[in-house]
Image (cartoon, rainbow, N blue to C red):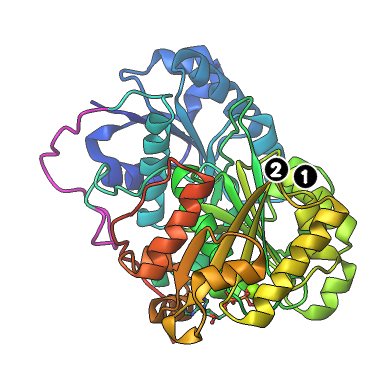
Amino acid sequence: MSRYLLISRSAEYETRLRRLLRSKLEALPGEYLAFGPDETLAQLRGSPRVALLGPLLNFAESKAIASALQERHPGIGLIVVREQRSDLEDWVDGMAIHAVLSPEATDQTTVDLISRLEEWLVSHGKLTPVREEPEEEQSQAEPDADVTGLGEFGLGAIDDSIALESTASEGDSDAEDEPADTLILPAPLDEHVRTEVIAVVAPKGGQGKTTTAINLATGLAEVAPNSVVLVDADVQFGDIAHALNLDPHYSLADVASAGDDEMALKALFSHHEDDFFVVPAPPSPELADDIDARALGSMLRNLSTMFRYVVVDTTPGLGEHALAALENATDGVFVTNMTVPSLRALRKEFELLLDLDILPSNRHIVMNFMDKSSGLLQKDAEEIMGAKVDVVVPRSGAVVFASNQGVPVIHHDVRDPAAKALRELVQRIEPSAAPSRRRIHRKTRTP
Ligand SMILES: Nc1ncnc2c1ncn2[C@@H]1O[C@H](COP(=O)(O)OP(=O)(O)OP(=O)(O)O)[C@@H](O)[C@H]1O
Ligand SMILES: [Mg+2]
């Protein structure tokens, strides 16, 4: 039984989609739209779960058919098949669509998007699960030999957030020369959902803030796919984009100056394949001068209305940007190593934040680089710091290895003790997060 619908004016695209989706696809020629959405949908035999509109449909007809589909098939997933042009925002704004797909996207990207959207709709209770009917023959998806049909991807929830995303930026070498071809829309926040801003800070450099922030965002995104944004507020020397193998088009400088226009903001985020977004630091330190701490604070407040979790990596110490992050944070993650100067500095940091009345109400202390050769015991460290340690992350070669590969360690080496400890931190913030996850195989950075 067909469960995907294509309404388009391109016979070529229809042939391609038929090859990919086979009997799961029902296609209607766009010419029907001239008679209005009711007449068009009267031709339908099946009950579509995901509809692709385009290529070659205009805005008015796409909008009319999108709303008719939503009315008749509540919960349906809608993908517009169209190039990203300058008026794309009007399309996204004007229709309750889930994603925009380039007609030039690879077979893999196309099938992947449809599959992930359907999975997301099921996981969010918008569609009921379907039992997979065995296909008589294998799907003909080429050239991606891995694509054997929908339902076999198991890629988790849909990227239901917006990203002008190039598959090349996700380290997919097959797609390296592709244009940005998928616009993924934001996971709508449920009404009354509690959103959190988590500032990751340390009084001294090199303690593991960035490592902690990256893995925290990755772990939270498993629970809230595409409702997590990782902000690199280490304004001068932030390196999250590089650490995650991203090739961003926009940075914090653009996002902080975009004001509170939600649509404009969403188009500036970079998307990571582990289902979270990144606001990278500016590409060069001079650009940091343009980022005013107040603008950063107001950007964080805006982001907290759009994302369930905003994770902020910061500059070492309590400069104006780190203070702006803490001022707007619900949670502070304080990272230190096992050396006396760092522990003492953290104690002073707590005292200052208390004086300023901006110590976030939820506090998590991460003792990083734990190793027995430091000569200090945890209880000594707690005494110097004047606070209890919440999570102990051992020194681990896997952290360095993962970072060199451009992959979060909690996904790269799930059994590593440091990865497990970082997961404990994720669980402190989101208790429903899984304590472990099976290994994810993926391509990593080529040296
Ligand atoms: N538990 C660990 N075991 C081994 N290496 C680690 C560990 N945590 C972090 N590192 C490594 O230490 C280095 C510094 O970590 P990271 O960049 O996260 O620190 P940071 O506090 O963000 O530094 P900066 O202040 O320069 O921004 C990185 O090379 C990272 O891979
Ligand atoms: Mg850092």
Circle 1 residue:
301
Measured from the top left, where is residue 217 in percent x and y?
A: 54, 56
Q: Residue at x 41, y 25 (%)?
A: 125
Which residue of the protein is positioned furthest toward the left in this rendering?
136
Task: State the SS at label 2.
Answer: loop
- Find out whether residue 296 is within the magenta segment: no
- Is residue 156 in view? yes
Amino acid bearing label 1: Arg
Q: Residue at x 57, y 59 (%)?
A: 388
Instruction: Magenta stretch: give its range.
Output: 130-147
Q: Quadrant of the C terminus?
A: bottom left
Majority secondary structure of the magenta segment?
Answer: loop
Instruction: Looking at the picture, tell me which residue is in the foreground, 370 or 150.
Output: 370
Quick check: which quadrant has ligand 1? bottom right
Instruction: Looking at the picture, tell me which residue is in the foreground, 378 or 20.
Output: 378
Measured from the top left, where is residue 129 in percent x and y?
A: 29, 27
Whether tag 2 and tag 1 are in contact, CB under 8 A, the answer is: yes
Q: Which mark is residue 209?
A: none
Circle 2 residue:
304
Task: State the SS at label 1.
Answer: helix
Amino acid bearing label 2: Ser
Measured from the top left, where is residue 258 in percent x and y?
A: 82, 52
Find residue 280 and report its image quarter.
bottom right
Q: Measure the C-alpha gap from mark 2 to mark 1.
A: 5 Å
Q: Residues within 10 Å of mark 2 (few under 14, many from 20)?
A: many
